[in-house]
Each structure stands twice: as structure tokens, then as C-alpha cells.
């Protein structure tokens, strides 16, 4: 009996992605002024609520305050213990999480639509009226201190710390090193005060998706309409990042088997005219498995298991960062290889086949980011935070399709100057070339 084996040598045909028109969320303002964006999906019984708060690390008065305040909400119900809260959320199939960024924080809530009227008031109670407890704070502090001690010997963690310190300095909490002392310095009173100042109607935008029945919509409106009015924190001004940052910051970590490399550029923000094209360039450079740096550092030279490249956006600025953990014995060679690839991009036009590979990858990735209600809502929330809407999807798709070798080369010459990169190296730095 003959068995037919799949052909793993010939890739399937690539078909062009047709234009998509994304649904426009409905928007209304609650009685306290909070914008509520709703994306109805009658086929999805799970309700997702995304609460964006314009208060991030760059708004905190002291190191760790933002992270501690919002991470401990679930353990700070005014009427239930941490265990009772966890059991109640589990019983109703609800999940609450927090993610912090430089300029904002995001609370995400999910629960079955039928359980929203019962569980959302409990959740709202602890996110809007938390009563932080000293014993829970101490448990969290002990956990973070253990994490700090564990990570001391991790080159990638130290590299990130040095990068932020080099760019932001001690004038911003983002640039300050985590220490046992500043972890212990956080108090219940400071957390309560930070929450009081930041969880205000003027700081909040709501995004809601799923089967938004009248009872679900009414529950969300009634609860979040109770958030006290108040102005948002001041917009983040352009940070006084060093115009000519230290070119190389190297730190020896004896006995390590790998070195962590971070190469960073301070770039314009999300509103920059170059942003869409730069996203294409970033992906080609190190943003996917077929990228230049992945092929060179991993496939041809075997210096690393992986490399990444991407941008972190905040306010009117961004940081473009190339990261890789490389074999310690080849630290300098890996850095040289990175800059050699950037030089090649300046001097040699990118071939049609490589351009098409990146184009197909990015178009597919763009589709995946909006292929269901939840991922679309998250993407829409990102666009909204920079004053954009669903039309950004078509603008991105058009930019990807129209990118050509000459436009890419212009972007490379404008942005990829060797002397503008801050280089952070942690690990075996004994044989680095001095510059």
C-alpha cells in the first residue's frame, strides 16, 4: 500500500492579501467623560475589557510605585481577602491582569458575558477603591527581592538595566537601578496616593469587545461612570535623553558563557512620517526569523540562538533596540557583524526576493493582529493612544506594499549611523575594541 507523503520541499503558493475594511468601533462618553469604545461580536461569549490609564513609569514619583500599585489591585479588595478574591474570580471564569509601560498602564479584564453583572462589580471595587494591605505589600516586596537576587547573574537583565540607566539617568525612575532598598521603600500610603491621583476619569479610556448585551453594556457604563472626575497627568514632554549618549557601556560578568548586547537608537515617535517605513526596515534588519541579523549571527556564524530588533514608543519619542545573547568568546565579532550588516544595508540595494519575503511576512502579521475581536481591540487601543483609528490598518498595508529598495536605502542612511548607536555589552568584555 503506497503512502502519500507531504511535499516539504516546495512551499505553497503565496497569494496576495486582499484589502480589508475593518469595523469601526462605536464610541460614547460616560457621564464622567470617560471614552468607551465598543466592538460588538455576537459570536463571542467572552467579554474583554481593556482599561488604558495614562499613568506609567514616567509618571511615578518614586521607583516601583506604578508597578506595585496596579499589580497589587487584585489583592486589595476593600471587602474580600486575597484568597477570597482569587476564588471568586476563578469560580466565575474571570481573569484580571496588568501590564505597565513607560507612559501608560493597562488593566485587562475577561469573563463570560453571562457572569459580567455578578463579577464586574467585585472587580471594579478593587480596581477603583483598593485598600492596600501591609502584609500583602511585604509578600510582594519579598518576591521582588528574590527576583532581583536571582537576576543579578543574568546578563540580559543587567544589559536592560544599563541601557535604561544610560538613556534616562537617575532623573527618571525608569533609569534608576532596582535595589533591595528602593523595593523596601515602597509604602502602602504611597501606593494609595498614586492610585488616587492616577485612577481618574481624565486618565482613562475604555475598550470593550464581545457579545455586548444590554446588561453587559449597562453594567460597564454604570460602574465606570462612577470613577471620580479629574484631569489626566501632564503629557510626557520630550525627554532630555542624551543627545550624544555614551557610545559604549561595557560591564564584565566573570564566568559567564554568553554576553548580552543591546544596540540602541533614540528615534522620533509614533507620529513620525518615517514610522511605517522604519517598521519595514526594522523587520528586515532583525525583526523576524529570516532577517539579516538572524541569518548572519545565527545561521552563518553560529554566534547566537536568536536576535531581535524593534521599537518602544512613548510620548513623542521611541527607542529602537537590537538585542542578542551571544557566545561570550565572540562578543566583539558579534557586534562587528551587526554593524557590518547595517553598513551593507547602506551600500547595497536590497534584492527583490528579500523585499518580497519581508513584505509577505509583514502583511501576514498585520492580518494576524486584527484577525479576531480581541486582538483587533488591542491594536485599536494602541492606535487610539496616538490619535489614530482603524484607517491606520490601510495606511500600514499601503506602506508595506509600496516599499522599494530605494526608499529603504534612504531610510537606512537617515537612521542607521554607527556613531549614533548606544552600545551596551554585559559579559566577556575583556577584548572589546576601544572606541
Image (spheres, rainbow, N blue to C red):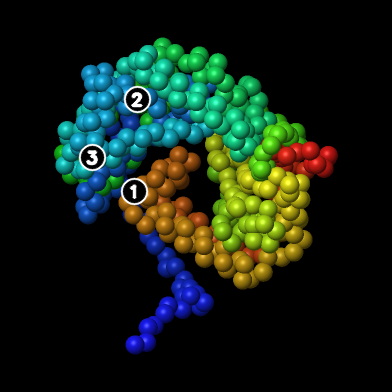
Nearer to the camera, 270 or 242:
242
Q: CA distance from mark 2 to mark 3?
A: 18 Å
Q: Residue at label 1?
A: 374
The mark lying in front, picked from 3 and 1, is: 3
Asked if residue 2 lies left or right of residue 296, the reply is left
Q: Is residue 359 above or below residue 49?
A: below
Identify the residue at image location x=23%, y=18%: 79
Sequence-first disc among 1 and 2: 2
Q: Which mark is residue 73?
A: 2
Q: CA distance from mark 3 to mark 1?
A: 17 Å
Q: Is residue 358 above or below residue 211?
A: below
Identify the residue at image location x=55%, y=16%: 181
Place of residue 277 in the rendered image (x, y in percent of width and height, measured from the top left): 60, 55
Sequence-first disc among 3 and 1: 3
Q: Which mark is residue 93?
A: 3
Sequence-first disc among 2 and 3: 2
The mark lying in front, picked from 1 and 2, is: 2
Asked if residue 399 lies left or right of residue 98, the reply is right
Q: CA distance from mark 1 to mark 2?
A: 23 Å
Asked if residue 432 lies left or right of residue 22, the reply is right
Secondary structure beneath dot 1 equals helix
- Asked if the residues shown at circle 1 and circle 2 are in contact, with their CB atoms under 8 angstroms apart, the answer is no
Secondary structure beneath dot 3 equals loop
Secondary structure beneath dot 2 equals helix
Q: From where the camera sits, is residue 241 visible?
A: no
Q: Is residue 338 above or below residue 9?
A: above
On-image quarter of the C terminus: top right
Location of residue 272 (image quadrant): top right
Identify the residue at image location x=27%, y=30%: 86
Place of residue 195 in the rendered image (x, y in percent of width and height, measured from the top left): 39, 20
Amino acid at each position: 500500500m503506497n503512502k502519500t507523503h507531504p511535499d516539504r520541499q516546495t512551499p505553497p503558493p503565496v497569494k496576495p492579501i486582499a484589502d480589508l475594511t475593518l469595523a469601526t468601533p462605536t464610541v460614547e462618553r460616560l457621564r464622567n467623560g470617560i471614552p468607551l469604545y465598543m466592538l460588538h461580536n455576537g459570536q463571542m461569549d467572552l467579554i474583554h475589557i481593556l482599561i488604558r490609564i495614562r499613568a506609567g513609569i514616567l509618571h511615578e514619583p518614586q521607583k516601583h510605585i506604578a508597578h506595585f500599585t496596579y499589580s497589587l489591585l487584585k489583592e486589595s479588595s476593600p471587602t474580600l481577602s486575597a484568597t477570597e478574591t482569587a476564588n471568586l474570580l476563578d469560580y466565575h471564569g474571570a481573569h484580571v491582569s496588568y501590564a505597565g509601560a513607560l507612559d501608560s498602564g493597562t488593566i485587562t479584564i475577561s469573563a463570560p458575558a453571562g457572569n459580567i453583572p455578578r463579577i464586574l462589580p467585585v472587580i471594579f471595587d478593587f480596581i477603583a477603591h483598593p485598600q492596600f494591605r501591609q502584609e500583602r505589600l511585604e509578600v510582594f516586596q519579598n518576591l521582588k527581592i528574590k527576583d532581583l537576587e536571582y537576576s543579578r547573574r543574568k546578563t540580559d537583565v543587567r544589559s536592560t538595566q544599563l541601557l535604561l540607566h544610560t538613556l534616562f539617568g537617575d532623573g527618571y525612575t525608569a533609569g534608576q537601578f532596582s535595589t533591595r532598598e528602593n523595593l523596601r521603600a515602597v509604602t502602602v500610603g504611597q501606593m494609595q496616593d498614586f492610585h488616587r491621583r492616577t485612577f481618574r476619569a481624565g486618565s482613562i479610556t475604555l475598550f470593550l469587545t464581545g457579545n455586548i448585551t444590554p446588561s453587559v453594556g449597562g453594567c460597564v457604563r454604570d460602574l465606570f461612570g462612577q470613577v471620580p472626575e479629574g484631569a489626566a497627568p501632564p503629557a510626557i514632554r520630550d525627554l532630555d535623553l542624551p543627545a550624544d549618549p555614551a557610545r559604549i557601556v561595557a560591564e564584565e560578568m566573570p564566568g559567564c558563557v554568553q554576553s548580552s548586547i543591546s544596540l540602541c537608537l533614540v528615534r522620533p515617535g509614533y507620529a513620525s512620517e518615517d514610522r511605517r517605513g522604519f517598521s519595514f526596515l526594522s523587520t528586515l534588519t532583525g525583526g523576524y526569523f529570516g532577517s539579516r541579523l538572524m541569518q548572519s549571527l545565527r545561521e552563518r556564524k553560529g554566534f547566537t540562538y536568536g536576535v531581535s530588533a524593534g521599537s518602544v514608543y512613548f510620548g513623542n519619542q521611541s527607542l529602537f533596540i537590537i538585542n542578542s545573547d551571544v557566545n561570550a568568546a565572540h562578543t566583539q565579532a558579534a557586534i562587528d557583524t551587526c554593524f557590518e550588516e547595517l553598513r551593507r544595508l547602506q551600500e547595497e540595494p536590497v534584492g527583490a526576493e528579500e523585499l518580497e519575503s519581508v513584505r509577505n511576512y509583514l502583511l501576514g502579521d498585520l492580518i494576524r493582529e486584527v484577525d479576531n475581536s480581541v486582538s483587533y481591540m488591542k491594536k485599536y487601543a494602541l492606535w487610539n493612544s496616538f490619535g489614530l483609528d482603524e484607517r491606520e490598518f490601510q495606511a500600514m498595508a499601503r506602506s508595506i506594499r509600496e516599499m522599494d529598495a530605494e526608499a529603504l536605502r534612504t531610510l537606512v542612511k537617515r537612521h542607521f549611523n554607527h556613531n549614533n548607536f548606544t552600545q551596551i555589552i554585559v559579559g566577556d568584555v575583556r577584548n572589546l575594541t576601544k572606541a
